[in-house]
Amino acid sequence: MKARLAYVAMAAASLFLLPAHAADNCSGHYINVGQSADVTDLGNGNSLIVFKNVSVNVTDDRTSPIYMTSGDCVGTALILNGATSASGRCSRKDKDGDIYSYEFSLPAGADKGSWTFVGGTGKFAKLRWSGWWKETMASGKSAGGVWGGTCS
């Protein structure tokens, strides 16, 4: 059970997720594969989890600069009284070697999280994108979902 929750938390790490909302001008899917999860049992079904995963982003717009980018995500998840919250950072690289990084969060008990670009190199250096994400599947060490946001 705790291992499953650890990988659910890792999915949260992996930016971007759900059918686009009216104000969204970018959207796509993500795929995560868990690399590690260190679970601290806090007792009474509560846990603190530190995780790392590999993530791939697939945008709905194949001309987007973040289409088919990949990289690593690290973060923490806290499970208290049956509600999971999570936060962390991810960095992804494109085919040209340019990197972008973003922060993600999932409030306790929520089914949808948020993400915000925090920096990058090359073509990503001045981007200030942000949005939402939602996990839509999890199986073993793999998870995935949909995302949307403002990418302009």
Image (spheres, rainbow, N blue to C red):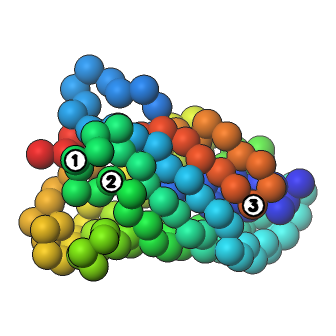
State whether residue 38 is above or below residue 2: below
For marks 1 and 3, the one nearer the N-term is 1
Circle on res. 63 = 1
State whether residue 145 is above or below residue 78: above
Q: Quadrant of the N terminus?
A: bottom right
Check if mark 1's residue and mark 3's residue have beta carbons within 8 Å: no
**What residue is disc 2 on?**
67
Tell me if mark 1 has few (under 14), some (14-19) or many (20+) residues whose alpha carbon lies within 10 angstroms of its own: few
Work out how far the residue at label 3 is from the one at label 2, CA to CA, in angstroms: 23 Å
**SS state under label 2:** loop
Give the mark toward the camera: 1 or 3: 1
Work out how far the residue at label 2 is from the one at label 1, CA to CA, in angstroms: 7 Å
Q: Quadrant of residue 59?
A: top left
Name the one closer to the observer, 52 or 69: 69
With 96 as the anchor, is 80 left or right in this view? right
Tell me if mark 2 has few (under 14), some (14-19) or many (20+) residues whose alpha carbon lies within 10 angstroms of its own: some
Residue 142: where, in percent of width, then height? 70, 56
For marks 3 and 2, the one nearer the N-term is 2
Q: Quadrant of residue 40?
A: bottom right
Amino acid type for the residue under numbered disc 2: Tyr
Q: Quadrant of the C terminus?
A: top left
Tell me if mark 3 has few (under 14), some (14-19) or many (20+) residues whose alpha carbon lies within 10 angstroms of its own: some
Residue 54: where, in percent of width, then height? 56, 69
Amino acid type for the residue under numbered disc 1: Thr
Residue 39: where, in percent of width, then height? 78, 72
Query: At 16% across and 56% down in the image, what residue appears?
Result: 128
Amino acid type for the residue under numbered disc 3: Lys
**SS state under label 3:** loop
**SS state under label 1:** loop
Name the one closer to the observer, 98 or 25: 98
**What residue is disc 3 on?**
141
Work out how far the residue at label 1 is from the one at label 3, CA to CA, in angstroms: 30 Å
